[in-house]
Image: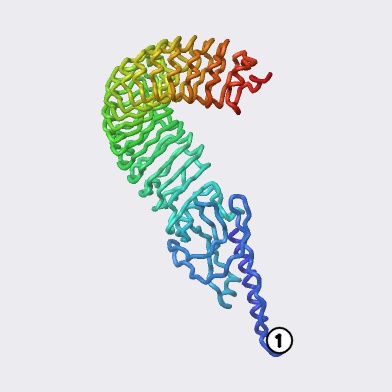
Amino acid sequence: MVKQRLNRLVSLLAAILLVGAAACTKSNTGQIATPETPAPPQVTIISNDQEITAVPTQVVAELPTSENEPLPASPTVVAAPPNTPTLAPTPTAVPDATSLAAAAVTPTPTPPTIICQDGTQVVQSEYEALLALSPLNNDSASDYPFYWIVAECANQHVITISWNNVEGETLPPQIGSFPNLIALTIIGKNLSSLPPEIGNLTNLEGLSISSESLSSLPPEIGNLTNLTGLGLLSNTSLSSLPPEIGNLSNLTSLYLSGNNLSSLPLETWNLRNLRSLTIGGSPNLTSLPPGISNLTNLTSLYLLYNGLSSLPPEIGSLTNLTELELSENNLGSLPSEIGNLTNLTSLRLVESSGLSSLPPEIGNLTNLTYLYLFNNSLASLPPEIWNLKNLDYLLIEGNPELTTLPPGISNLSNLTTLSLGYNNLSSLPPEIGSLPNLRNLLLSEDNLGSLPPEIGNLSQLTELRFLGTRLTSLPPEIGNLSNLTVLRFSGSSLTSVPLEIGNLTNLVDFMLFDNNWTSLPPELCAALPVGITLIPADLCTP
């Protein structure tokens, strides 16, 4: 395309020479003829598979004297997508006749450049480095060679690069040619290594790498001391990290997910500024070392889909933790030191089939607002759990050995959502009616045969759902739930529905699905609010 531009330029120059020659002849009236101004040539830019045709404005500008000198400002001829660099023709000076003649014989190509959102142009060396990274070469039919690369630039420098579909097994060394780069995302399939030049990006603040073939990181990654966020995602061949990762002293967020790590280097625990740590999808990671206690600034710890069989007692030293998630590991117990995490507001224990009990020290987590106990093997809950008076959300599901809830549940006076499902509960304690702020009650696939009449005391309840229970009837006190808007029964064994449901004047969604019901009593239908959504819709059809 550069050659095509030059050919068009030569044609244009030749046309100007001819017009200039015509201007030197006299007209029939003896006056100098005024030549007609030729229409400027059209420039076609292909950007993201769309052709854009524009007529450039004539400009006067000096060409750069060195490859690192920024090219002079020029009018933008391509309307680029937001945050996408714009490829524009390099401006040229208005030539005289001598330079025109020389250009017609020996044209000197000048590559295009990139115009940033702030109007500045990227220095030529960084433009050429982008060309080296691009899977399209200079002879491509496209004037927009960065199809798979999205780059942002400002103040004459590339500041972010997002490179999708990296095709090679490594990156060109030119990846290290962007001294002002602050964010780099690399996604590939066959990328197995990174060049040492990546260590030149010393201003980098965010780095994300994803390639199923990546097997190692270069030690030079330790040079990126300004990094605050590092994400290594779905690098299924990556089994270890270099010890130099411990040099990233400004790192605040480390996301290791979908790799194949069996251990972490001891230097990892030198990252004392970490605020968020995610280690997930490494089934060969079976333990964490005591050094985790060094991460005293950590506020979020997510340990997901690993092979952890235990947690070190030193986890109790992370007293600034507010979020802790332990999902899909092989935990058989929790250390009593977990009770030291008194700033925790969220605790998720998910899919640990060997977890049959919780330590009584869990009752020390008095700032906890969210407790999620899903698909474990809990047979009972410690009485101390009912000391968690700030709980707002409590989910206890998938614990088939859990048959009862103790009266202490009445202490959870701030609870707004209670989800009890896929356990083996045969009844609910009457004290459940003492939860004055409860708004959502979800009961799924348990052995409940009845509900206590005290359920009618839940005056703030807005949603009540039953899925696959053994309920055959409802207490008439259900009609006292004056704020109820959603009442759903699915797969239950109800044989009767109390007429008091007609007192629920705020009800907008009433479902009796898969309950062998074909109609409701006419007096109940007459009492239901106008406009209510019934499922099935013909329950009140005569």
**Residue furthest bottom in the image:** 30
- Image side of residue 97 versus residue 340, left or right: right
Say which residue appears at 64% left-offset and 73% top-offset.
14
Quadrant of the image for the N terminus?
bottom right
Taking 180 as reference, is 110 above or below it?
Answer: below
Could you tell me residue 34's position as x and y percent? 66, 82
Using the image, determine if residue 432 lies above or below residue 238. above
- Quickly name the residue at label 1: 27
Task: Name the image colouring.
Answer: rainbow
- Answer yes or no: is residue 350 visible: no
Instruction: Using the rendered image of the protein, determine whether residue 56 is visible from the camera's viewpoint.
Output: yes
Q: Position of residue 166 (x, y in %)?
A: 51, 42
Q: Nearer the viewer, residue 285 or 134?
A: 285
Quadrant into which the C terminus falls: top right
Farthest-out residue, right: 28
Q: How many numbered discs?
A: 1
**Three-letter amino acid code at the position of disc 1:** Ser
In-front residue for pair 105/502: 502
Where residue 117 appears, as percent x and y from the top left, is 48, 57
**Residue 293, quarter of picture:** top left
Name which residue lies at 43% across and 52% down.
Answer: 159
The residue closer to the viewer here, 425 or 8, is 425
Callout 1 crowding tier (Cα within 10 Å): few <14, some 14–19, many ≥20: few
Determine whether the residue tagged by mark 1 lies in a helix, strand or loop: loop
Q: Position of residue 33 (x, y in %)?
A: 67, 84
